[in-house]
Amino acid sequence: MARCAVMGAGSWGTAFGMVLCDAGGDVVLWAREPEVQESINTTHTNELFHPGVELPEQMRATGDPAEALDGASLVILAIPAQTLATNLQAWRDLMAPDAVVVSLMKGIELGTMRRMSQIIAEDGGIPAERVAVVSGPNLAREIAQRAPAATTVACPDEASAKRLQDACTTSYFRPYWTTDVVGAEIGGSVKNVIALANGMAVGLGYGANSQASLITRGLAEMSRLGVALGANPMTFLGLAGMGDLIATCSSPLSRNRTFGENLGKGLTVDETIAVTKQTCEGVKSCLPILELGRSHGVDMPITAQVVEVVHHGMSPAEMLRNFMARETKPEMGAV
């Protein structure tokens, strides 16, 4: 039985902890909120993030990072992307020397343009072969309800990837392994930005044609950046690419799509942040993703327009007009 520490008891951390429990793991969640700790330990629920969902009785929660990490062979990081570096400074010496450290985060760090696996390796002092990523069409609420889903688990070391795969395989959760960490992380990060754009289109009242066009061109944008960074282009046709993109752009459960939809309906960025209870990684990551693309000579027109809306006050209607007014190109040559 694998001892698993899940650092972060938000919606995705809690749902993935449930998966690990159902796969036979011994799971302790680190929860920042005292009410979440008490809810998980006394009623086996997380009413703050998953109201009405019954969690496994063997799942435990603590507010002490040392207690959560004690003896854990799998360390799952499920915190906001922009807080990772700071938290790693406090946690790195508490981790077992042979633990596989797994990122559930889908973002790029502001200022440094680092992927989450790079931060874990560099700031956490974790060898790359023990740093893994989970990325796919994994809307947390559906997984908490044990609806069938699949995902990608990525690690440069095949044995570690398979070890993680075994630890999170259940009757309703099916992981596929890969060694393409770059592709999995770029897919998971860029899809949030495309979902913001697609949500704006929904909020403006546009239909399936508009959304399909944005999603498809978003896939091209994602693939261009990933390939420039050394990813396998086939990764973007899989669960961490197309699969995650479709789920995040199309579901009302998606935080990033919902954020964009509110903008499309006329709310300001500040008003939308005020009504959003959970982190929308695309809002902060769109800027470093655009900078990452520019630093590698990659054209990212959708991301550029999202940055204009989120950070520079452009209206969603103007964003879509600008995208449609771009110079026409051959489709395959533009990928």
Image (spheres, rainbow, N blue to C red):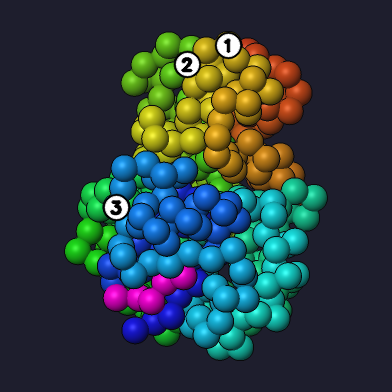
Question: Do the residues under discs 2 and 1 have CB atoms within 8 angstroms?
Answer: yes
Q: Is residue 67 left or right of residue 142?
A: right
Q: Which of 251 and 241 lies nearest the eye of the viewer?
A: 251
* Residue 160 at least partly seen: yes
Question: In the rendered image of this protein, does residue 97 appear above or below residue 25?
Answer: below
Q: Which residue is mark 1?
A: 266
Q: Which residue is mark 3?
A: 54
Quadrant of residue 286 within the rendered picture? top right
Q: Report the span colored magenta.
A: 24-28
Q: Which of 214 and 163 lies nearest the eye of the viewer?
A: 163
User: In the rendering, at what x and y percent does residue 165 appear?
Assistant: 35, 73
- Element under label 1? loop
User: In the rendering, at what x and y percent does residue 64 appear?
Assistant: 61, 69
User: In the rendering, at what x and y percent does residue 243 appear?
Assistant: 36, 47
Dominant secondary structure of the residues highlighted in magenta in the image:
strand
- Callout 2 amino acid: Gly
Q: Which residue is mark 2?
A: 203
